[in-house]
Image (cartoon, grey):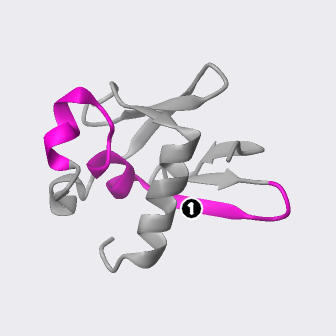
Amino acid sequence: MIPDSVKLSEDKKSILINYSEDNHLILPSIKLRAYSPSAENKKNLKNPNFSQHQNVLITKIEGVGNYAIRIIFNDGHNTGIYSWEYLHEIGVKSQSSTNP
């Protein structure tokens, strides 16, 4: 699912992804950081530690071609490339999960 827009919230605690037909996802920084698809974080993806990223904020979002974004976090992490499909997957996990 390719979004129409991706915006960083004013408080830098989430990104808002808008799709056509008024569909959208709000993805919190804590989830995005815990589910980072970077090589250094791959071992943590099955059992992410959300509390470890409780105070992490998003400082910048960069486009990567037509297929993804790179999210730069205030803890220095910036190597994860989030494809549109992966962001949608995180959004679905966030909606069905009781974690932050």
Q: Is residue 24 magenta?
A: yes
Compared across the picture, whether 53 is left or right of 60 comes to: left
**Range of residues picked out in magenta:** 20-44
Rendered-image quadrant of the C terminus: bottom left
- The x, y position of residue 9, in whole percent, is 57, 52
Q: Residue at x 16, y 58 (%)?
A: 49
Compare residues 55 and 37 and report the one nearer the observer: 37
Q: Residue furthest bottom?
A: 98
- The x, y position of residue 90, in whole percent, is 44, 56
Compared across the picture, whether 34 is left or right of 25 comes to: left
Compare residues 28 and 13 and report the one nearer the observer: 28
Label 1 environment density (alpha carbons within 10 Å; few <14, some 14–19, many ≥20):
some
Task: Identify which amino acid the numbered label 1 is placed on.
Answer: Ile
Q: Does the magenta stretch include residue 77?
A: no
Q: Residue at x 43, y 77 (%)?
A: 96
Q: Which residue is drawn at 22% across and 60% down?
A: 50
Instruction: Look at the numbered disc 1 and give the secondary structure of its residue.
Output: strand
Residue corresponding to mark 1:
26
- The x, y position of residue 68, in whole percent, is 56, 31
Q: Where 21 sits versus 97, above or below? A: above
Q: In which quarter of the image is residue 38?
A: top left
Residue 56 visible in image: no
Q: Which residue is drawn at 44% across and 35% down?
A: 59
